[in-house]
Amino acid sequence: MAYLSLKNINKIYPNGYHAVHNFCLEIEKGEFIVFVGPSGCGKSTTLRMIAGLEEISNGEFLINGKRANEMSPREREVAMVFQSYALYPQMTVYDNIAFGLTLQGVDESVIEERVQNTARILGLSDYLDRLPRALSGGQRQRVAIGRAIIRKVGVFLMDEPLSNLDAKQRVTMRYEIAQIHQETGATTIYVTHDQTEAMTLADRIVVMKDGYVQQIGTPRELYFDPQNVFVAGFIGEPPMNFLRGTVREGSLFFGENRLDLSHKLRDVSSYEGREIVLGFRPECIRLGLCRDAYQVTGHVELTEMLGDNTNVYVFSGNNQAILKIDSHDTPDTDSDIEFSIPLDSVYLFDGKTEKVIKDVV
Ligand code: ADP
């Protein structure tokens, strides 16, 4: 039996807006689940329904097999970490972390031990006497996490906890959150719009768009086996490239290029006259000609040197693509290049439904 079950969960706000549609997910104890998707897709709403901060309009939420729709947040034994740290400014780090236990009337010596232990996990032992204003953003967020983990609840809910930090702090805190999860083994549900956070932290990711779940899977599954154009374009940085065109005589034409789809599609004739989206990842291409690959010519508009790799922006026909290549091989801006897309790195999507075409060679 799953630890948390969300069965056909819907949220319709009082103004009639249907923010979450038929959300289904089974979560095992100890899993790190990430909800990811663009702003407004329903991630926070779903998290808040799990927390008990927002009513579930219909569907059923179970904790350990028991219906939890009507349980209060306290009964659900969840702790939530918000984007804004929500620390008490006049209290020391120690008192902020201890606050929940103090309210519950837990014995002072137990509190002392648990605060010290939590501070050790979070690297805050030297800061316990400080007020929040004397801490960096990353340290404040750690105090907020400490306040949640000290309660030893069953589930941690985190809503964009890193979004107030600068880029460097975000990377450090991301690593720390992964370590805290390893150390505590607590079931965690984490909301973010950042695919890198999702990919690096999650056991499983739920990709959402416009209130609908698009795909649920491990980071590997989402990267290698995206089910539709949206997921393919959302996961991966830079995003997957898409060449959109109509199939004529079994091929996709754009610019000077003709890609013979019979190399990929089993039943190519049934696609005649239909729109197809051909996807390939920036990191899978080779410069020059290769065997078992589509050869493409394009014009280099711009290059972005990132260190070991360079992003090369190429135009071909009406399509723009980003190629990620070894910086030693950077082509000149404004030059024409030839590159190869290995056939086994090509994804095909139906232009109308945007779903991946599975019947491929
Ligand atoms: P996300 O966390 O993915 O950015 P939210 O869950 O916050 O998205 O919001 C999902 C949608 O629901 C958005 O379109 C938002 O405007 C709408 N929404 C959020 N709260 C309310 C509310 N109280 N009443 C009506 N609509 C809301």
Image (cartoon, helix red, strand yellow):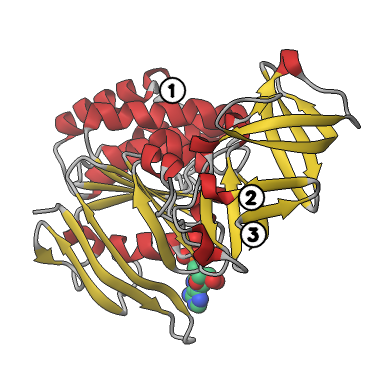
Q: Along the polypeptide, which appears first: circle 3 or circle 1?
A: 1
Estimate the x, y position of residue 183 in percent, counting from the top left. Answer: 25, 26
Query: Marks 3 and 2, Cα distance to the nearest angstrom?
Result: 20 Å
Question: For the residue labelled by badge 1, is the local secondary structure a helix, a strand or a loop?
Answer: helix
Q: Is residue 52 above or below residue 227?
A: below
* The disc label shown at residue 127, or none: 1
The percent position of residue 82, horizontal first and vertical second, equals 44, 50
Label 2 secondary element: strand
In the picture of the structure, the residue carrying the numbered disc 2 is 242
Q: Are marks 2 and 1 in contact (CB under 8 Å)?
A: no
Residue pictured at 40% horizontal, 54% vertical: 358
Residue that badge 3 annotates: 249
**Few, some or many C-alpha atoms within 10 Å of disc 1 (few <14, some 14-19, many ≥20)?**
some
Q: What is the three-letter code of the residue carrying label 3? A: Glu
Which quarter shows the C terminus? top left
Amino acid found under the numbered disc labelled 1? Tyr
